Amino acid sequence: MSDFRSSENKHSLIAMLYQMAMKDGVKSDVEMSFIKHACALFKVDPLNLSESVLKDKLPNYSGSLMQSIADLQKVILLMFVDGEVTEQEHEFCLELALKLGVSPQAVQLIIEKMLKSHGKPIDPKELFEIHNIHQN
């Protein structure tokens, strides 16, 4: 299965994941494992990521709306991976939604559903239905 993402978008996704992991001030082992897996999947060498990309500034991103939704969902999943959702992480997801052109209302609903289910991922079909309702 080939990945059609640009190199810049792959780096941006890894940077978004890294920034999410840092929002609560603690890089947990499970978060770092998630990010290492994403690096391997997208063939991104984490050593090649510039320091500026990993800082607080949101990275440039030019994916389609569908790709933005899929990548934002990866960030949301990372938020839940350590079993604790902080206000900083929650706010980061909403801020990131705005940056990616995704409805913050849809993201809020997805986060609420995942909180109620203790972090269980949302079915992709339901995920895109939620976004379709709130995007229009």
Image (cartoon, rainbow, N blue to C red):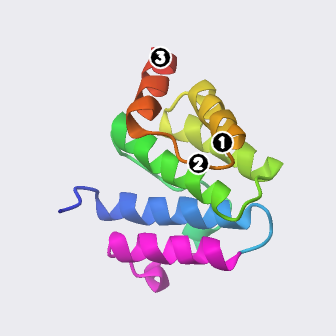
Residue depicted at 52% across the width and 19% down the height: 134
Looking at the rendered structure, the kind of residue marked 2 is Lys
Alpha carbons under labels 1 and 3: distance apart: 21 Å
Q: Dot 3 corresponds to which residue?
A: 133
x, y percent for residue 103: 55, 27
Q: In this view of the protein, which residue sits in the foreground, 70 or 7?
A: 70
**Disc 2 to disc 3: CB gap under 8 Å:** no
Residue extending farthest to the left is 1
**Disc 2 to disc 1: CB gap under 8 Å:** yes
Question: In the rendered view, would you say 73 is above or below 26?
Answer: above
Residue depicted at 73% across the width and 45% down the height: 90
- Is residue 50 visible to the viewer in this orientation of the structure? no
Looking at the rendered structure, the kind of residue marked 1 is Ser
Q: Dot 2 corresponds to which residue?
A: 120
Secondary structure at badge 2 equals loop
Say if the magenta span includes residue 50.
yes
Q: Dot 1 corresponds to which residue?
A: 117
Alpha carbons under labels 2 and 3: distance apart: 21 Å
Q: Which residues are magenta?
A: 28-51
x, y percent for residue 17: 56, 62
Q: In this view of the protein, which residue sits in the foreground, 115 or 132?
A: 115
- Is residue 69 visible to the viewer in this orientation of the structure? yes
- Dot placed on the residue nearer the N-terminal end, 1 or 3: 1
**SS majority, magenta:** helix
- In the image, which disc is placed on residue 94? none
User: Is residue 84 shown left or right of residue 61?
Assistant: right
User: Is residue 61 shown left or right of residue 96?
Assistant: left
Instruction: Check the picture and name the quadrant holding the N terminus.
Output: bottom left
Frontmost of labels 2 and 3 is 2
Residue depicted at 66% across the width and 32% down the height: 108
